[in-house]
């Protein structure tokens, strides 16, 4: 046995491992700086699910495993029979078949809160106020005059006031940041988990400013006429209704649109029904999962996405896909691969597992 060669090989492995450990510290420091000074929210494009509660994947699963950053809830007012008590239900239509996602709002919010990575990012919740009671033979009741307060109280009770980034906070930040949105890293570091967007077109009062909710309108011209509006919701990504421009105050959502069309036109929130379509997760123009997960034993070749249940199996692939500022969580093991990256990311051991992560080519 050649002990000299064996010793030299062990030294190379040790030195490589130490170099990786030192590099991890530098990467973490770079990402921390990005957390304070990262790009504003409206500089990114995020995957959103359309009518999220109707999809086959539960909403917590959409967040943790399908890279969904924005959920949509359609809200109706419903009474028990012909008499109170009444409450908010999540439902789209009277004619929808059974099992199409109808549920009380508090149940829907509890489902969202089951997501395990909420504290690592920010999630948009889009609230679309419906009124099926106004339709002929409607199956829901007409909203009471104080519907805004009812919805506000229910959302704060369900999600917790401390977890919500409010419109009032935004107004202060926007002025202090040179009329720019904060970064999602900044909001996460402040303990904020949710941004609540209200789309209420039942009457003109639906566009009133609010201390909690961010107000959405269907076109740029209407946003200009509504100075406090911050979100623009455009069907089919029709740029005649408004063209997304970074740092212009507005976050644009596209719905009922072709995926590639909406992405190529620069919409910030891309609403889709195709939650498990690989292109909606791996598209490099869309913000990567946060955090991203790596497991060298990942075996599903059709779902190497970097999400919790569908991790990537190479660190290099994860860092190439990762949007700057993303955390990459690595399952312990030996990763015998080149280690190169060109953007600020955080590399850390996946806290769900014991053991060490060793990176490098022995």
Image (spheres, helix red, strand yellow):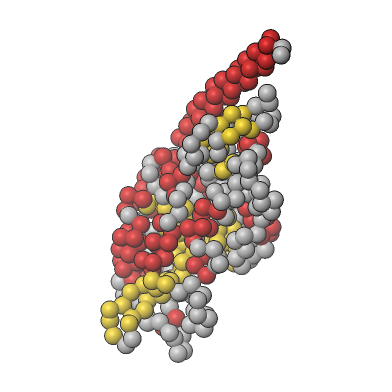
Task: Pick the quarter of the image with the C terminus.
Answer: top right
Quarter of image, res 90: bottom left
Task: Pick the quarter of the image with the N terminus.
Answer: top right
Q: Is residue 290 above or below residue 16?
A: below
Total marks shown come to 0
User: Depth check: 162 or 176 in front?
Assistant: 162
User: Depth check: 218 or 132 in front?
Assistant: 132
Task: Please tell me which residue is depicted at 38% across the width and 64% down the height of the picture.
Answer: 208
Task: Please tell me which residue is depicted at 66% across the width and 48% down the height of the picture.
Answer: 299
Could you tell me residue 120's position as x and y percent?
A: 46, 44
Could you tell me residue 155's position as x and y percent?
A: 35, 61
The reply to whether residue 103 is visible in this rendering is yes
Q: Is residue 162 above or below residue 21?
A: below
The residue lying furthest to the bottom in this view is 137
Task: Please tell me which residue is depicted at 69% across the width and 57% down the height of the picture.
Answer: 260
Task: Please tell me which residue is depicted at 39% across the width and 47% down the height of the picture.
Answer: 192
Q: In this image, 271 relative to 316: left or right?
A: left
Q: In this image, 256 relative to 227: left or right?
A: right
Could you tell me residue 34's position as x and y percent?
A: 50, 34
The residue lying furthest to the top in this view is 4
The reply to whether residue 8 is visible in this rendering is no
Could you tell me residue 160's position as x and y percent?
A: 32, 54
Quarter of image, res 103: bottom left
The residue lying furthest to the front in this view is 1
Q: Is residue 253 above or below residue 134?
A: above
Q: Is residue 135 above or below residue 230?
A: below
């Amino acid at each position: 046995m050649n002990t000299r060669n064996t010793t030299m090989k062990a030294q190379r492995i040790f030195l490589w491992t130490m170099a990786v450990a030192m590099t991890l510290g530098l990467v973490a420091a770079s990402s921390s700086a990005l957390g304070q000074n990262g790009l504003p929210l409206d500089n990114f494009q995020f995957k959103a699910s359309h009518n999220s509660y109707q999809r086959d994947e539960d909403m917590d699963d959409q967040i943790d495993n399908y890279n969904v950053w924005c959920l949509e809830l359609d809200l109706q007012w419903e009474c028990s029979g012909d008499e109170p008590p009444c409450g908010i239900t999540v439902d789209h239509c009277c004619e929808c078949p059974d099992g199409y996602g109808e549920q009380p709002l508090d149940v829907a919010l509890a489902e969202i809160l089951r997501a395990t990575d909420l504290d690592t990012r920010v999630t948009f919740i889009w609230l679309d106020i419906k009124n099926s009671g106004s339709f002929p033979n409607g199956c829901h009741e007409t909203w009471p005059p104080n519907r805004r307060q009812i919805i506000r109280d229910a959302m704060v009770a369900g999600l917790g006031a401390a977890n919500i980034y409010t419109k009032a906070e935004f107004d202060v930040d926007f002025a202090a940041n040179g009329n720019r949105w904060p970064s999602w890293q900044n909001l996460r570091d402040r303990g904020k988990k949710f941004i609540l967007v209200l789309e209420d077109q039942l009457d003109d009062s639906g566009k009133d400013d609010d201390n909690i909710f961010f107000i959405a309108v269907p076109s740029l011209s209407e946003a200009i006429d509504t100075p406090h509006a911050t979100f623009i919701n455009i069907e089919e990504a029709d740029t005649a209704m408004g063209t997304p421009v970074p740092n212009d105050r507005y976050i644009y959502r596209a719905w009922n649109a072709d995926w590639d069309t909406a992405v190529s036109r620069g919409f910030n929130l891309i609403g889709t029904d195709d939650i498990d379509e690989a292109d909606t997760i791996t598209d490099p123009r869309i913000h990567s999962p946060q955090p991203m997960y790596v497991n060298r034993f990942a075996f599903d070749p059709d779902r190497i996405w970097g999400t919790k249940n569908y991790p990537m199996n190479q660190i290099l692939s994860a860092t190439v896909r990762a949007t700057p500022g993303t955390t990459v969580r690595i399952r312990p093991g030996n990763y015998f691969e080149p280690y190169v990256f060109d953007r600020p990311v955080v590399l850390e051991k996946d806290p769900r597992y014991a053991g060490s992560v060793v990176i490098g080519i022995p």
